[in-house]
Image: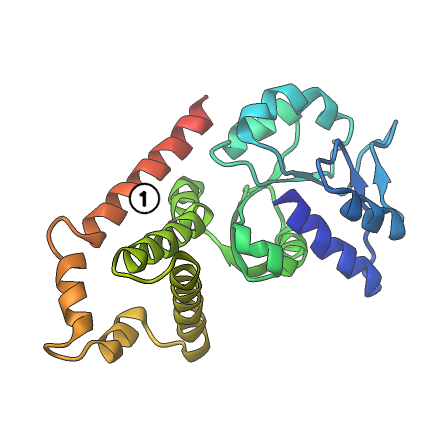
Amino acid sequence: MGGALVRGWIEAVRKGGALTLSIVDPSFDPELERELDSVGAVINPPDPGPVDIVVLAVKPQTFPSIVDGVKRFIGPDTRVMSVMAGIPMELLSRELGAQRIVRCVPNTPARIGRGVTAYVASPACTPEDRALVEQLLEPLGTVEPIAAERLMDVVTAVSGSGPAYVFLLAEVLAAAAEQEGLDRDTAMRIASQTVAGAGALMLQTGEPPGALRKQVTSPGGTTEAALDVLGAGDGLGPLLRRAVSAAAARSRQLGKG
């Protein structure tokens, strides 16, 4: 996610955006580091002082180990934007000494500007802070404000982890096609394009997924036969509800840890 954000901001700088980027301990590929250098970004500044906004794009388990280093960037007017799953704003504020906190949940399609990023802001954040955060997140795709922090665990389970569910669907669909006789490469191409095309159709038409599903489903046809299996009491609906519940529970555990 850090890399996706940085790529979006590099493009913004190239288009004339008034951004100054400082990157700490980047785990980027050499090409991205060269791009950062081309827009004048500073990597591992020795004595940065307070900045306008600090972005925490690390694994939540590593947060305790970076607190002291992050504090060098914090001043009375610094905003802190975190993409760490599960770490609550109260903990971020207490550990970093900042009041204007924003939690974000991007997802991996952000790498190509097609992601969705939900965010929630602390009460200390101003409308201007929210506008700045949305501007910084726009290169990743759609930006969705969330009413309450307690809902961020659900967002993490749905949009944050959701791409993995879709990728698994493509894998399983391809494996089923292979079992029915298609060769592996053809099965994977057909399954992947089907998943991608269905998602694109849903976005482009704006029609509800239920309506689009019904358009594909002829009475007594092949799709209905498959949906009878997927819609059974132990089918896809209950399975996904259990999966989302497990992911949300894990997000809460990460916050407590």
Measured as percent of width and height from the top left, residue 59 is found at 57, 31
Residue 232 sits above or below residue 186 on the image:
above
Q: Name the residue under label 1.
A: 244
Residue, x 61% and y 33% (percent of image)? 58
Q: What element carries label 1?
A: helix
Which of 243/220 is in front? 220
Measured as percent of width and height from the top left, residue 203 is found at 44, 72
Residue, x 31% and y 70% (percent of image)? 209
Residue, x 46% and y 28% (percent of image)? 255
Q: Is residue 43 visible?
A: yes
Count the marks: how many?
1
Residue, x 39% and y 56% (percent of image)? 184
Measured as percent of width and height from the top left, residue 247 is found at 36, 38
Which of 177/246 is in front? 177
Crowding near the residue tagged with mark 1, few <14, some 14–19, many ≥20 C-alpha atoms within 10 Å: many
Type of colouring: rainbow
| Quadrant in the rendering for residue 194 | bottom left
Residue 201 sits above or below residue 237 on the image:
below
Measured as percent of width and height from the top left, residue 16 is found at 84, 64
Residue 61 sits above or below residue 188 on the image:
above
Residue 112 sits above or below residue 146 on the image:
below
Left/right placement of residue 215 relative to residue 1 reads left
Q: Image quadrant for the N terminus? A: top right
Q: Can residue 20 be seen in this view?
A: no
Which of 232/76 is in front? 232
Residue type, mark 1 in image: Val
